[in-house]
Image (tube, rainbow, N blue to C red):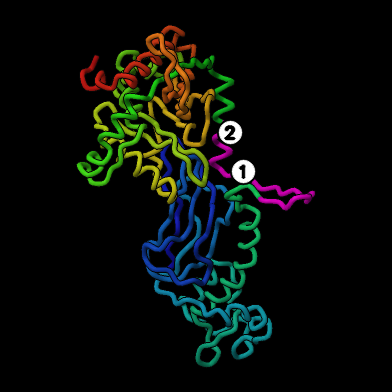
Amino acid sequence: MAIEIKAPTFPESVADGTVATWHKQPGDAVKRDDLIVDIETDKVVLEVLATADGVLGAIVKNEGDTVLSDEVLGSIVEGGAAAPAAPAAAAPAAQAAAPAADGEDDPIAAPAARKIAEENGINIASVAGTGKGGRVTKEDVVAAVAAKKAAPAAAPAKAAAPAATAPVFAAGDRVEKRVPMTRVRATVAKRLVEAQSNMAMLTTFNEVDMTEIMALRSKYKDLFEKSHNGVRLGFMSFFVKAATEALKRFPAVNASIDGSDIVYHGYADIGVAVSSDRGLVVPVLRNAELMSLAEIEGGIAAYGKKARDGKLSIDEMTGGTFTITNGGTFGSMMSTPIVNPPQAAILGMHNILQRPMAVNGQVVIRPMMYLALSYDHRLIDGKEAVSFLVAIKNLLEDPARLLLDI
């Protein structure tokens, strides 16, 4: 019995996907819950698992093909046995040489073998039977399917496989390498261009003295980690808490435009940009305004691991009312982050550097960070944007304000 392998049901925000990698080939044995194929969408890579034990039959969608929600990708022959490597390789020659049983065009074949042959477009008369009296068995047909599909399936795989990293060339080489964009990279490029084309985007800057935050972290980081089951205290949780507090004061920064309407959100779903092998992804901390520092740090750490392992789900990356990105982890001193539509603003963090500052008439060395807030001027006035960023600065320079709500 053949069981269809279908693409996942995509949410409304995902139109289609691309077959990224087939982890099994026709004729390979599969177990229930084995990873069969990866589907790359605009947001994440979705894993399609086997729903039954058996043998992988026909592949309908090759690597690089576009697939729609619930579209058939291939099939599993339930209860089938894996085709041995040697007979599979020799199948074309055997098929050409073997005569039909009893001199007839239609050989003796098991019903299951005929069904698999029909489903995969195999002429049963061309299959060499290894059963008693030359009978064509199910395993014979599975081997024939493997031989037929292996070569065609390999070509698209080479053409579609994206480079995980930029190629490395030896000095003096005048060579070029052309690879297709990954689906995520292409979608990011499209959305960023659309954002700049459709928004009145501006960026305002400020700087924050990180002395108090760094002292607080240094004093309590060991106790924090011990008290919260290994969760480490970083800087991002302070920025998320400061942002959620500032969003309460300036609700337009947490709003979005829908047609001719402004949608104000009574919650703060904070997207946190995370770097992965597939590019920058932005999982969302839901109701971050209700989360403790430990819950924020734990959520970010979990998302970071999922991003590295390619395990982020579409739901975890959908939505968000405001985004924070930290270019400082890569050494960035200053940047103008691009707003992620339909959000109205994004906060950019940068590198912390010791710089001379004038404090109470004295020149002192302080750990300073530049902050950047890019915003949609159609929705947010300059005064609101500047005041929002100043609020974040004040909350971070005096962390007690976060506890006292002042």
Residue 304, given in percent of the width and then of the height, sits at 40, 43
Residue at image point 45% right, 30% down: 325
Residue type indicated by callout 1:
Met
263 in the magenta segment: no
Q: Residue 67: which disc?
A: none
Q: Quadrant of residue 298?
A: top left
Against 355, is 164 above or below? below
Residue that label 1 marks = 181
Q: Nearer the viewer, residue 131 or 190?
A: 190
Quadrant of residue 77 within the rendered picture: bottom left
Query: What predominant SS class does the magenta segment belong to?
Result: loop
Residue 255 in view of the camera: yes
Q: Residue at x 50, y 65 (%)?
A: 24
Q: For the residue labelled by badge 1, is the local secondary structure a helix, a strand or a loop? A: loop
Residue hosting label 2: 189
Instruction: Give the x, y percent position of residue 152.
Output: 64, 63
Q: Are marks 2 and 1 in contact (CB under 8 Å)?
A: yes
Report the span colored magenta.
Answer: 168-190
Residue type beneath disc 2: Ala
Please report the residue visible at 66 percent of the width from the left and 50 percent of the height from the top.
Answer: 167
Q: Name which residue lies at 27% across and 26% down.
A: 289
